[in-house]
Amino acid sequence: MSLPPETAQQSSQQEVDSLAFLLNSANLGSDAGPLQHWLTQTDILTTDNLDFDGVFVSNTCKGAKKGCGPRDVGAEFLDSAQDLESVYSSHLSSCQDLMSSLNSAADPAVLFNTDPNLAPNARSDGPLEPVSRSLSASLAQDGLGEASSGHSGHRGGHGHLKDGTSPRKHPQRGQGYRRLWQQVTKVSKGQKLQDNLGLAFSDMTVEDLLKIVLKLAPQEPAVDAIKQGLYYLDSSAMAALLKELAKQGYLKRAVEIFDWLRNLEPSHELSSLCDLYTYTTMISQCGSHQQLRRALELVAEMRSRGIDCNVHTYSALMNVCIKANELDLAQDVYKQMLEEGCSPNLVTYNILIDVYVKRCQWEEAVKVLDTLEKQAIQAEVRTYNTVISACNKSGQPEQALKVYEKMLAAGVKPSATTYTALISAYGKKGQVEKALEIFRDMIRRGCERNVITYSSLISACEKAGRWEMALELFSKMHKENCKPNVVTFNSLIAACSHGGHWEKASELFEQMQTQGCKPDSITYCGLITAYERGGQWRRALKAFEQMQTQGCHPDAAVFNSLMEVLWQSGVLLAQSKALQLWTLANRSGHFRIYTNSKQDSNVLQYSTVAFTSGAAVVTVVRWVSELKNKLLKDGPGFFRDKVVFTLHKSKQNRSEQPSARIFESVSLLLAGNASPFTMHLFDQTITLEAAAAPLTVWLRSAAFNDFVHIQQSQQLKRISLDLLLSEDVAIAARCIEAFNAVKRYEQLFSINPALCSQALLAQRAQVVHLAFKYGAAFQLKDDTIYDALQLFDRVACCGAPLNVAAWPLMLCSCLLLAARQVEALAMWPALEQVTLLTGFGPDGLMAMERNVLMWLGHDVSTISPMRVIQLYLERLGHYLPDFKAVDRVTKDLQTLVLKVACSPVVGLRPSLVGAAALLVVRRARGMVPAWPTVLQTMTDYTPTDGELAACVMHMEALVQQ
């Protein structure tokens, strides 16, 4: 049924008026008039550039609400604040052309078609207004380099393949408009396009789609939530969405969406979103070794789809290879890239240098710089820094400095990373002055120092043993308001440790915790090493306990240092704890004893690794204990003809001690316990050998039981750590107080041998012999007899006019005075009894006693060497009932002290005589260490001390007599 001409003309005019109203309501017109021009915008942000991470960089669009898309020459964009930003099309006719066409009864379906292929004469007039920046544009700014050489003249989002074709299908560009047209027909009078809920996806930005995915529950599919919005994206915006998901920790969501797109049929409208850009982006997001396979599969899939890889694809794949530590594969990819005629860019060369850094191939890294220069590619600061790092890791500080000079010559401004790498290079070579010179140059050039710079310099000072300089730099760091981190504190603690300043190391440890810096395993290792070198075994144990509480796992260095400080302390409680901790370390994979024997060999071979004396001694004790168990279980035949045990050193470690020191400790241990082992030191390796027959005899002997007495002590095993520490604290306090009294006595009553009569010294042996004869007659303790001898020496060397012939009477008087000082009243010998036993008359005894008191200034205080020895033994824990060897040690000490007393050497301080006697006896008995660290700390005597060394030589000569 047809309408009258007037009605038809009126109807056409109404349609034109309705369309004008609609366009005016939608705010699509320019400032010149609502219907003068109808311009279109694209649905996504298009880009020209791509870095190896798959980021797209736009140099043209500063970002519309959703981004701006590709355009032909002369195309311009409309700044619409409300709608139609996501629509992709070519230019439409002006509003006047539309009215003319309507009046001529043209087909409205054709007039409103937005397919650019059906609007060949579309054009646009008027300038563009600046548009707001979108997320896609922001993401794009992260990129480096151009996407490919073939894109230089194309400002759209779709890259061209090598044949010049575009991976996006042009007929699909109109699909968004067709859907929009369906929504336009639903707009009622008084409504706007954005009022219609059906326009949600067409109006969404990349940011909006991102927010939708981020809000999804884990079990909700991402594709279902945003699928409709993908119709308004092109591949570059799709790549931006995928990368941002990965950046925000939603890589699985990105993989989910991309894999869905990959599996679409080629005829599907969205299948074209899988192109060079999106593939390269997803390849760049692969990181682990398992994901490397996925990256390779994606490259294979690109090839099967006819999508050629470009420089960014290859660079991304090389980077994935490095993350998976497949360095050979990274170089294979680089070679393939060259074979396919794809020219590397700066990003590619930077990645190639990374490969050489990991391989410590500094020469190859330097050659890359030469290649860049030949190809007229300007190296950036990162490039130079990476090459300097390669030289640094290879121990080539001089080469690193040459690269630095080349960097300055090229006009590239060094960064803090540059200087830090140079400082680190010199620090590793121990050239701290060179490192400081670089630091001063850094200051002159006005380069800001950061925490990494200071940490590297402090580390250089630590390696060079310059702990004072390290602390000065730490102070300077504070003045510059540079906050230290855990690496800084670790280097400082290690520096103080190597300098022997455990107190400062402990102070720094407390300071780092106060400043909120959490200690790590390296921190505790440095702290325990500091305590080990300071002989602070209780503090080391507490640090180890705190380390475990904090979840830090001790490594071999920690266990070796802990074994060292505990065993070298000489305290039985500490040595027992060392044996327990050895078991813990063994379960953690350290100090494993391996059997290296072949079935047909007549030698039973064992080996392990230990790099401190304490750890080596504890390991040997545990090993021979296991041999005893094997003997009891399998019999002597288990040992074959010979048993060999090899102690290896680890790779270079800061806690490592010289092999000669370890050899000396183990030799002392075995020789002093009459073991049948012979030892050899060759090329830093210690070997113990013993024939099976004598080894079997020794393992069944009393000497062996003494050897392992600590390990067999059940009481020591049951002591908890808290009880152990509190017990030792109490003993230490008591012993230190007593030793301070000894030092005061020695200062007040020093003996001058020059004042002693030579005739009296010549009769020294008779004096001592008579003293013990009288003491036995008076039923006095040996300690009292030695006290009396100490009084006798004081009188003999006081310079008084003595009658040498009367020395027996003077000795008897000293015995009586000493007994009254230390013996109970009931044990004092009566005067009549003394007269009867000695033949001295009461008057003569009383007269001599008055003279002795006068010569001593009426002060009969005395401390003999034997009492000092008892103090030393108490400090070591020899009072423990399970210590079976204590009687043998005490008897040996008594014998040695008696020989010293009989020698014509007087005036030696009791503390010195006691220290030397204990050292000589412990060494002879194979007790390691011969002079424990707790006694060094308490007495200030060291084995290398001149007085102690001379006294030890004197006693060893007496032992040989």
Image (spheres, rainbow, N blue to C red):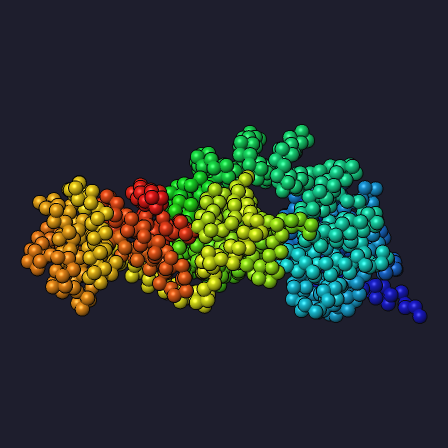
The quadrant in which residue 589 appears is bottom right
The residue positioned 53% from the left and 60% from the top of the image is 584
The quarter of the picture where the N terminus appears is bottom right
Question: Is there any visible trace of residue 213 in the rendered image?
Answer: yes
User: 21 or 567, which lies in front?
Assistant: 567
Taking the spot 9% from the left edge, 54% from the top edge, the residue there is 848
Horizontal side, residue 231 vs residue 689: left or right: right
Residue 122 point in image, percent of width and height: 80, 50
Q: Position of residue 188 (x, y in %)?
A: 74, 70
- On the picture, is 522 further left or further right than 761? right
Q: Is residue 920 above or below residue 218?
A: above
Q: Nearer the viewer, residue 447 or 500?
A: 500
| Residue 728, image quadrant | bottom left
Instruction: Where is residue 747? Give x, y as percent.
Output: 20, 49
User: Could you say where residue 665 lies in the image, as x and y percent from the top left?
Assistant: 45, 47
Q: Quadrant of the C terminus?
A: top left
Is residue 278 among what the camera can see?
no
| As drawn, 179 above or below 337 | below
